[in-house]
Image: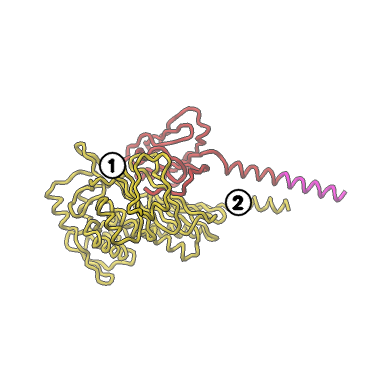
């Protein structure tokens, strides 16, 4: 019996497997595999529990790199670049799904969300050397934010219009990885793509996943913890990518209707939704809409829950969000639950 | 005689088993360990609870500050300095990441009570 015990323990230790490729690394032990990689301009990590965890984690990393090649605007042969350069392209299902979901959110938000902000984003220089553009240039760039014509898989853009997947590619990717894990029979997995979180099932012990929500005004603090299963949690905020010019702070989220950096009193929005792509699009759309219009959108369309942090130090949650959320005990914000009966 | 031999063999296996168990368990329960990776390769492992006095480490021109029980990126020459803005790591769910240089500072072997941070 002791011999068997010893063999199990030793073999348990020897069972650790590792894999590296480019910036990606996978380590697996027993039924758990962890992966970490740099892709899509961000740091990604994932954990999957399964008999095939090691192989599934490697497949997930390889798939992320494949998707990056489709979505990378700096890669001339990517689908996005070919569409932006030629104005016409027959896209794959990956890009089509993003264009269709974005069109829906654009329509419902009356233009507060738009994939065709490519020229506007380039003008502001986020990701390079950001600067406040001239009014004339902004005017020109917002005239290029327009509807995308799509017929089956054939997409066409007006001349000069460019799409930007900054508010959809990571959400699409986390959603596709979650679907891939589910189709492989995985009951427990967590994907975090630069802070876009999506979970499959529950933790292996049956408990809910615990996902903290970042405090937008204190990097070392959280607003609280969500307890969730089978859903995505995505935050958009003004606190990570921004620059200051002449004492004014400009965040990287742009309003396609005005061409300006968002400055409407909303510091961050966290969206919880069963679809990662929709959560990604909605978190940006809600930031642009501002608190009042965002809550109107939620009342009208629903299908998700959210938390909004405003500059008057208030955290406002929809009831479904509040039901899964445990505020931090040292929270220095007033907490409101919208439409609480 | 035969029984005595069997008992000795069992005892040896038992002791080996207990030793192996202790070694593995000790390895798993080490206090907060910071792991610094550069382009996916581990370049430093630091037991944060063993730190007596604060010190800095240079990683590709960026400065990591190591203190007792915690670690952060103190200075960086990358354009957006997100790694500096991200403050101290509180645990494995919140790594400090420098995207341009592909530096990751993570805490292992200690739980911060959450599985991920939405940000």
Where residue A21 sits in the image (x, y, percent)?
A: 44, 53
Q: Nearer the viewer, mark 2 or mark 1?
A: 1
* Chain drawn in yellow: A
Furthest toward the top, the residue is B53
Q: Quadrant of the C terminus of chain A?
A: bottom left
Q: Is residue A312 above or below residue A254?
A: above
Residue B56: image quadrant is top left
The percent position of residue A235, horizontal first and vertical second, equals 34, 50
The magenta stretch spans which residues?
B1-15
Q: Considering depth in this image, is A248 or A53 the residue closer to the camera?
A: A248
Q: Residue at x 35, y 50 (%)?
A: A337
Of all chains, the one bearing label 2 is A
The quarter of the picture where residue A239 lies is top left
**Mark 2 → mark 1, Cα distance in angstroms:** 55 Å
* Position in image of residue A162 (x %, y %): 22, 58
In contact (CB < 8 Å): disc 2 and disc 1:
no
State the mark number for residue A312: 1
- Mark 1 nearby-residue class (10 Å; few <14, some 14–19, many ≥20): few
Location of residue B109 with respect to A193 vertically, above or below: above
Q: Colour of chain B?
A: red
Residue B84 appears anywhere in the view:
yes
Residue A15 appears left or right of A76? right
**Horizontal placement of B14 versus B97: left or right?**
right
Q: Which residue is mark 2?
A: A14
Mark 2, other Cα within 10 Å: few <14 / some 14–19 / many ≥20: few
Q: Is A102 situated above or below B22?
A: below
Between discs 2 and 1, the one toward the N terminus = 2
Question: In terms of depth relative to the viewer, which is nearer, A176 or B78?
Answer: A176
Q: Position of residue A10 (x, y in %)?
A: 64, 50
- For this orientation, the residue located farthest to the left is A136
């Amino acid at each position: 019996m002791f011999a068997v015990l010893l063999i199990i323990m030793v073999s348990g230790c020897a069972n650790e497997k590792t894999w590296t490729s480019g910036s990606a690394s996978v380590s697996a032990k027993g039924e758990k595999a962890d992966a970490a990689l740099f892709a899509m301009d961000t740091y990604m990590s994932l954990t999957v529990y399964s008999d095939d965890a090691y192989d599934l984690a490697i497949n997930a990393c390889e798939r992320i790199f494949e998707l990056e090649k489709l979505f990378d605007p700096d890669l001339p042969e990517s689908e996005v670049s070919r569409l932006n350069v030629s104005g016409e392209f027959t896209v794959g299902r990956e890009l089509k799904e993003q264009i269709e979901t974005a069109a829906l959110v654009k329509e419902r938000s009356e233009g507060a969300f738009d994939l065709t902000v490519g020229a506007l984003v380039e003008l502001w220089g986020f990701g390079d050397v950001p600067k406040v553009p001239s009014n004339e240039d902004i005017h020109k760039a917002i005239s290029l934010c327009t509807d995308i014509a799509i017929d089956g898989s054939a997409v066409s853009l007006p001349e000069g219009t460019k799409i930007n997947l900054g508010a959809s590619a990571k959400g699409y990717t986390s959603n596709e990885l979650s679907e891939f894990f589910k189709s492989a029979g995985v009951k427990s997995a967590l994907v975090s793509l630069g802070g876009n979180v999506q979970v499959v099932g529950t933790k292996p012990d049956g408990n809910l996943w615990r996902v903290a929500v970042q405090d937008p005004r204190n990097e070392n603090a959280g607003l609280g913890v969500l307890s969730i299963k089978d859903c995505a949690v995505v935050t958009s905020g003004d606190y990570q990518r921004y620059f200051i010019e002449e004492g004014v702070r400009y965040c990287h989220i742009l309003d396609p209707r005005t061409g300006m950096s968002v400055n409407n009193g909303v510091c961050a929005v966290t969206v919880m939704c069963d679809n990662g792509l929709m959560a990604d699009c909605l978190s940006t759309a809600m930031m642009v809409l501002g608190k009042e219009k965002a809550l109107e959108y939620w009342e009208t369309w629903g299908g998700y829950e959210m938390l909004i942090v405003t500059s008057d130090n208030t955290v406002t949650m929809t009831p479904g969000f509040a039901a899964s959320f445990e505020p931090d005990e040292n929270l220095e914000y007033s907490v409101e639950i919208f439409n609480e009966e | 005689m035969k029984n005595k031999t069997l008992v000795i063999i069992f005892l040896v296996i038992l002791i080996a088993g207990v030793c192996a168990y202790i070694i593995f368990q000790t390895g798993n329960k080490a206090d907060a360990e910071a792991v610094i990776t550069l382009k996916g390769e581990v370049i430093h492992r630091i037991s944060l609870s063993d730190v007596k006095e604060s010190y800095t480490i240079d990683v590709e021109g960026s400065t990591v500050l190591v203190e007792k029980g915690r670690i952060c990126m103190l200075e960086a020459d990358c354009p957006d300095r997100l790694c500096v803005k991200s403050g101290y790591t509180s645990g494995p769910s919140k790594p400090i990441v420098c995207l341009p240089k592909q530096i990751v500072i993570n805490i292992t072997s200690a739980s911060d009570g959450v599985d991920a941070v939405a940000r």
